Every structure is written in C-alpha cells, then in structure tokens.
Amino acid sequence: MVSGFGQQALISIMSHLVFIALAWWALQALRFETLLRANHVFQARVLYVLLSIVIGSAVSNFFLDYLLWSQQLPLILQNITFL
C-alpha cells in the first residue's frame, strides 16, 4: 500500500514537470515582448515561469484526475453486479 503512494507521488511529480516544461515551450511561440515595457527583462522571465507553472499544473491536474477516474471505473461495474 505504501509503495503505491510512492508510485503515485512519482507519477504526479513527473507529470507536473513534463507539463510545465511543455507549457514553457508552448509559451515561447507567443510574442509577449510587444505587451511588456522596455528594459523589464527579469520581470518578463518571471512572468513566463509563472504562466508556465499555472498552465502546466492545471493541465497536469486534469491528466492525473482523468487517470485516477479511469482507474476507478472498474469499481462501478463491481458495485453494480452486487446490487
């Protein structure tokens, strides 16, 4: 049982990191420079990081929830057969 929690934690960490990196990569396609003031490079980089974390975490949570729900679907069928 405890090893299951360890595996779930590892999957969650890896999922978050992958989707944050994917969000970072996708945000590079946008041209935020036109929206930002000149000479605010550090603030622009912080904005990229924060947006990447927000978008990547949201997508990762969706993915992990979907994975959990798909694993719980067989339990519905088991409960219906006992009714």
Image (cartoon, helix red, strand yellow):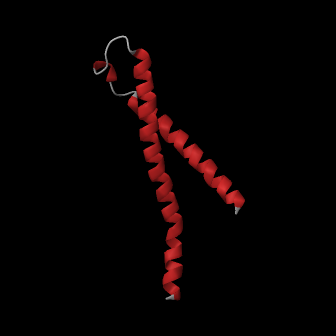
At 51% from the left and 86% from the top, the residue drawn is 81
- Res. 28 image quadrant: top left
Q: Position of residue 70 (x, y in %)?
A: 49, 64
Q: Position of residue 55 (x, y in %)?
A: 41, 40
Where 73 falls versus 82 (above or below)? above
At 33% from the left and 23% from the top, the residue drawn is 32
Q: Is residue 5 left or right of residue 58?
A: right
Quadrant that contains the N terminus: bottom right
Where 32 falls versus 23 (above or below)? above
At 54% from the left and 45% from the top, the residue drawn is 15
At 46% from the left and 58% from the top, the residue drawn is 66
Q: Position of residue 30 (x, y in %)?
A: 34, 27
> Is 3 or 50 nearer to us in this picture?
50
Where 34 falls versus 67 (above or below)? above
> Is 22 or 41 nearer to us in this picture?
41
Q: Is residue 28 left or right of residue 77?
A: left
Q: Position of residue 20 (x, y in %)?
A: 49, 37
